[in-house]
Amino acid sequence: MVGPSGGDRADAGSALVDPLQGTTTPVKKSRFYELLDTVFQDAAKRGMVGCKEEASVDSTGLEAGHRSAHYAWRAGQKRYSLRRWPKLTLACHNASHLLAEVLVTDGPSQDAPLLAPVLHGACRRLRIDRVLADAGYDAEHNHAYARRQLGIRSTVISLNRRRGRRWASTEYRRQMYRRFPKLKYRQRAQIESAISRFKRRLTSCLRGRSRNTQQTEVHLRVLTHDLLLLAA
């Protein structure tokens, strides 16, 4: 089924993909990210997204098995007995609850290494002035990357009280230790509310079995979630 393509229109028996074209054609942006960019452009036109915005980052897990929670409860089985499950790391616009970026990985895993790629994608659609995150993302390199590389003015990340260490030895973590903005940090609850709505409206169980199909399904749900907010 591999053969040369015959011009703009496909002839009978021609291949669906030209193998020689892949080496010269530049990599295109994923269709999901193009649609997500369009959603935020529409939100900006409606006045839902402005110049200096506040965003939050958090992670959640989804179910990927074929059995339901009710069946597991009736059968006396443990609900979370799987060693691996799809883990979603989300960046949420606090004012509108629009999801600006999603990263699908395998859980359980550490949260701190996932903050940088999620913020990098979210900054393409939002002009983030302040980012909020819990203690799972506490790391000096996350503060430095967000402020120095992405130009985010304020990073409010709760301190992870490491064993045997009472005083933060690095610059940005020391700022969190000296003067932590508790009132601003309360707005991190916005992403928890968005995740709760995401699971209630679109369910917390994925139908796909492979990681590629699960990622595609998650992308469709993120777009559906944002479009429902735009329609409202």
Image (cartoon, rainbow, N blue to C red):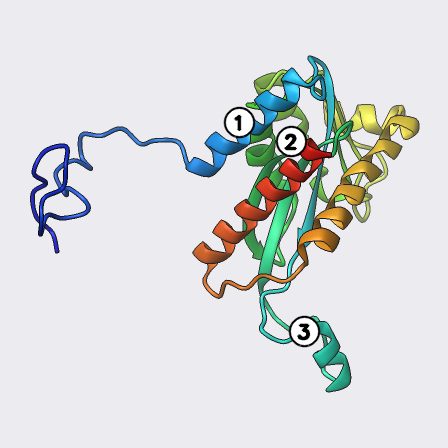
Kindly report which numbered mark, 1 or 2, lies closer to the viewer in this rendering.
1
Q: Secondary structure at mark 2?
A: helix
Q: Amino acid at mark 3?
A: Ser
| C-alpha distance separating marks 1 and 3 | 34 Å
Asked whether, in this view, residue 75 is left or right of residue 26, the answer is right
Query: What residue do we see at 63% from left, 62% from top?
Result: 205
Pointer 3 residue: 68
Residue density around tag 3, few if under 14, some if 14–19, many if 20 or more, within 10 Å: few
Pointer 1 residue: 37
Query: What residue do we see at 12% from left, 56% from top?
Result: 1
**Label located before the other in sequence (1 or 2):** 1
Query: What residue do we see at 67% from left, 73% from top?
Result: 68
Q: Amino acid at mark 2?
A: Asn
Asked whether, in this view, residue 73 is left or right of residue 8, the answer is right
The circle drawn on residue 182 is none
Q: Quadrant of the C terminus?
A: top right
Q: Nearer the viewer, residue 3 or 54?
A: 3
Q: Quadrant of residue 93?
A: top right
Pointer 2 residue: 142
Place of residue 159 in the rendered image (x, y in percent of width and height, measured from the top left): 81, 37
Q: Quadrant of residue 8?
A: top left
| C-alpha distance separating marks 1 and 2 | 24 Å
User: CB atoms at circles 1 and 2 under 8 Å apart?
Assistant: no
Query: On screen, 70 above or below 35?
Result: below
Query: On screen, 3 above or below 137?
Result: below
Kindly report which numbered mark, 2 or 3, lies closer to the viewer in this rendering.
3
